[in-house]
Image (cartoon, rainbow, N blue to C red):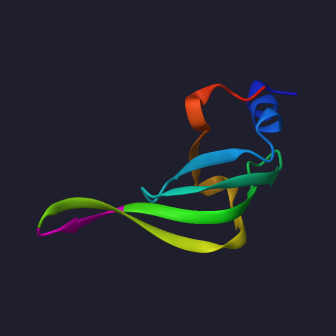
Amino acid sequence: MSNAMQYLTRNMNGNVLVSLKNGSWVRGILRAFDNHLNLIVDNAEEMYHVQTSEGVQLKTTRLGKRILIRGDTVVAISTPGGSGGK
């Protein structure tokens, strides 16, 4: 098993932050993944920057109870603290 797959396995059922190609992020609980990096994420929220008259603000939108993120849209996956789980 590759290091990336081991990292995801260690962080199963934990919080993840997924960076996407469109510049947004998805935060939620990792429930499943496959070797194509397709991810199942629960309690997902999309986070993105919006330009306003006061400057750039971070906005969040709830995506749903369970979502599928296609692996070809994933740039990076991180966990709180970046420790890789235990």
Quadrant for the N terminus in the image: top right
Residue 17, horizontal then vertical, whole percent: 58, 47
Residue 24, horizontal then vertical, whole percent: 45, 58
Kindly indicate the quadrant of the structure image that contains residue 73: bottom right
Q: Is residue 55 left or right of residue 34?
A: left
Magenta stretch in the rendered image: 49-53
Circle count: 0
- Classify 23 as above or below 54: above
Kindly indicate the quadrant of the structure image that contains residue 23: bottom left
Q: Is residue 76 left or right of residue 51?
A: right
Principal secondary structure, stretch drawn in magenta = strand
Q: Is residue 47 left or right of residue 51?
A: right
Residue 81, horizontal then vertical, whole percent: 57, 30
Residue 4, horizontal then vertical, whole percent: 74, 31
Q: Residue at x 58, y 49 (%)?
A: 18
Q: Residue at x 67, y 65 (%)?
A: 43
- Classify 73 as above or below 37: below
Quadrant for the C terminus in the image: top right
- Decide which of 57, 25 is in the foreground and name it: 57
- Decide which of 19, 52 is in the foreground and name it: 52
